[in-house]
Image (cartoon, rainbow, N blue to C red):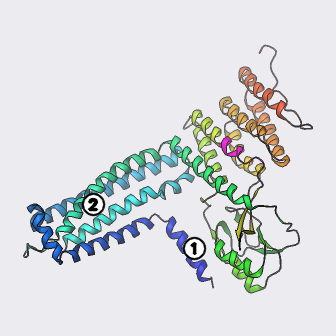
Amino acid sequence: MSDPSNVVFRSWRAATQSIAFYPVILSVGYVLVAVFAIAFDSSALADRLRLVMPSGLTSVENARSILSTLISGVISLVVFSFSMVMVVLNNAASRLTPRVLPRLISDTRNRVILGIYLGTILYLLLLISLLDQENPTKVPVLGVLLSLVFGMTCMALFVVFIRSISQSIQVDWVVSDLYQNAGQSLSRLQERLKAYKGTPDDSDWFCLETRQPGYLRNVNEARLGKLLCERDLLARLQVEPGFFLHVGHPLIKLSAPVGKDDAVKILDCFDFHNDEMAGDQYSYGLRQMSEVAVKAISPSINDPGTAVRTVNLIAVILDRLAGMPPVDVRCFDDGRPRLYYQQLNLQRLLFATITPLRTYGRHDPQVMIAVFQCLKQQLHRAPSDEQLHAVWTELMALRHDCDQSIENPWDRRAINEQIDRINPLRRPGQPALDLLAQSADS
């Protein structure tokens, strides 16, 4: 049986990522406001408020007409908003990549606007159901006044929603959003690595294997950290978050053996899903950016300019990885590192990010030159020897693809100019990149 803290952790993560989270919370808030407005109507302040309110708001018939009009109008806004969302999702799937759909669906701003719409409808329905035709003095004047405010708020938010949804369909906005999120994720990682003093040798540590298949999505770090502190253990994950595990795959190594009960408690802290992670990982953002660039250079879209811009932004993120170890760390009990995460090293990251670009864009010299410049930029930094080897290996693969796919002699000359700029940046002992062969008349 799962620990209660793990059940709460999984339930909370699932609830906050659901499109219904903010609408439910806001709807409950609007219901409470309606109850307050109705209760206020029986107080002495309500009688004073009626004396200063316009007569149109104190008439039962006028109030019912106002509320009916607002209900119809807000429902129309909801229907139109949902129609626009469906159009945007359809276009995003065809023009960008299906992987960006969860980000568009779970956009906080759009979910809040949807919640305000639904909450306003509930508020208006509760209010109109309490109007009494036979008692014209019992008009909840505060409730009617608030309904006007809520109606005007919905109209203003509809303009915000139109702007938001029109932005989200623009490829430049999507790429910029992915870039900013990847950069923020990397900044948080760099901040955590300030406490990193090196990864302990785990060659003789006790290993726990996963007992269920799926993508590793989340880890209840609070519960796991408490267990590690109580047993005075260090732990290192054997896979990076987002990795798909089969039953029996090594999951986590511990600095000392643990009993069966503790092993069950530790494994219960991991959350697996059948869909791939779309969480706080810069590597996932880079992969999404790469997929957007690949889609842009496809024959159906034919937008190499977007691909080049995306490659340039990918280069900025890769720049910041120079010299960074492929690890993440969590600290507990007075800042002591106890939990080590495995991250994609640069070789695997380049394979996941750059390989699709050179595979599907090998016939476009403009895109290939942008990828050459992206990799050349990494050589200007201070990469470790392992990172330098990964970059140079990818450069050799890129040069091979260009040699096989680009036939125009002037395009090959442009590629050779890039190679001439890259070769002086290699370290001693590093093999030089061969120039592409040129015909005698070029």
Q: Between residue 389 and residue 407, name the one nearer to us.
A: 389
Residue on which disc 1 sits: 10
User: Which residue is depicted at the point 63% across and 55% down?
Assistant: 185
User: Which quarter of the image is occupied by the N terminus?
Assistant: bottom right
User: Which residue is depicted at the point 55% across and 77% down?
Assistant: 8
At label 1, counting other C-alpha atoms closer than 10 Å, the crowd grade (few under 14, some 14-19, many 20 or more) is some
Q: Give residue 440's quadrant in the image.
A: top right
Q: Is residue 75 left or right of residue 312?
A: left
Q: Between residue 99 and residue 194, name the one nearer to us.
A: 194
Q: Position of residue 288 (x, y in %)?
A: 61, 49
Q: Between residue 348 and residue 34, name the one nearer to us.
A: 34
SS class, disc 2: helix
Residue on which disc 2 sits: 150
Q: Tell me the distance, in whole angstroms, between the alpha carbons under discs 1 and 2.
A: 34 Å
Give the answer, above or below, for where 435 lies relative to 383.
Answer: above
Q: Which amino acid does label 2 sit on?
A: Phe
Q: Where is residue 259 in the image (x, y as percent from the top left)?
A: 78, 85
User: Which quarter of the image is occupied by the C terminus?
Assistant: top right
Callout count: 2
Q: Which amino acid does label 1 sit on?
A: Arg
- 324 within the magenta span: yes
| Mark 1 vs mark 2: in front | 2
Q: Which of marks 1 and 2 is nearer the N terminus?
A: 1
Give the magenta range.
314-325
Give the answer, above or below, for where 53 lies relative to 83.
Answer: below
Q: Where is residue 33 in the image (x, y as percent from the top left)?
A: 29, 71
Q: Where is residue 360 in the image (x, y as percent from the top left)?
A: 67, 39
At label 2, counting other C-alpha atoms closer than 10 Å, the crowd grade (few under 14, some 14-19, many 20 or more) is many
